[in-house]
Image (cartoon, rainbow, N blue to C red):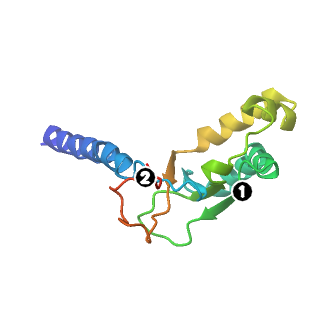
Amino acid sequence: MMKLLTRALLAVGLAAVAAPMASSPASAQAMAGRQLPDRPVVGVDYYKAPPGKQDEWLALYLKWHRPIMEYQIQQGATLSSTVYANSSHSIEPSWDFMIINISPPPSQAKKLPLTRGEVIKKLFPDLDAYAAGEASRWAMTVGHWDQSVIEVDLKAAHPGVYYPIIPAGK
């Protein structure tokens, strides 16, 4: 009986892990060709910390990663980066922090004058301390994923997700 229960739990666990992966390609393709060239690029990052460790995780983020985002904002490569925390107790969502990063539209994107490595070295001259700090933050991160979202042009000839946007005259 115990073996049967273990197998059933294993099957349910595998199905729970496999289901989101199976649906990812379809949702990823649904908006192909829909990015509006004059609209900002929006990225949403989700982080899950261990129970009771959210403030500790946030302190590590503020010390070791936020300065990089501030540099990108100062340089104009990122327009804004806002950190949100879940405001209620519930089974879902499975995240503690959601960070919404907004970048300029593709036609106005600005290239950073330094590579990511050069930015890190400039902001954190003690690279060993930086690496240890980031390792601590990631060791404490029990879940993370990034999501790109795009605005749906409700005034388009075909608002929705399947018709691509084709520039006029082409």
Mark in the foreground, 2 or 1: 2
Q: Secondary structure at mark 1?
A: loop
Q: Nearer the viewer, residue 86 or 40?
A: 40
Question: In percent of the image, x 61 and y 48: which residue is there?
Answer: 106
Q: Which residue is mark 2?
A: 166
The Cα atoms of the two marked residues, 2 and 1, are separated by 27 Å
**Hey, which residue is sitting farthest front in the picture?**
169
Q: Amino acid at mark 2?
A: Ile
Determine whether 56 is above or below 121 in the image.
below
Q: Nearest the camera: 122 or 137?
A: 122
Q: Amino acid at mark 1?
A: Leu
- In the displayed structure, 100 sits above or below 67; it is below
- Give left or right: position of 68 versus 162: right
Q: Nearer the viewer, residue 108 or 13?
A: 108
Decide if residue 100 is on the left or right side of residue 65: left
Q: Residue at x 62, y 53 (%)?
A: 105
Q: Which mark is residue 79?
A: 1
Q: Residue at x 80, y 30 (%)?
A: 118
Q: Is residue 168 left or right of residue 121?
A: left
Q: Residue 146: give x, y in percent of width and height.
A: 52, 47
- Going from N to C along the chain, the mark reached first, 2 or 1, is 1
**Residue 122 in the figure: left or right of residue 37:** right
Of residues 117 and 102, the one drawn nearer to the viewer in this rendering: 102
- Secondary structure at numbered mark 2: loop
Q: Where residue 75 sits in the image (x, y, percent)?
A: 80, 47
Around disc 1, counting alpha carbons within 10 Å, would you say few (fewer than 14), some (14 to 19), or many (20 or more)? some
User: Residue 161 location in percent, x, y?
Assistant: 36, 58
- Where is residue 22 drawn, in percent x and y? 28, 43
Whether pointer 2 and pointer 1 mark residues with C-beta atoms closer than 8 Å, the reply is no
- Among all residues in the image, which is located at the extreme top? 128
> Tag 2: Cα neighbours inside 10 Å, few (<14), some, or many (≥20)?
few
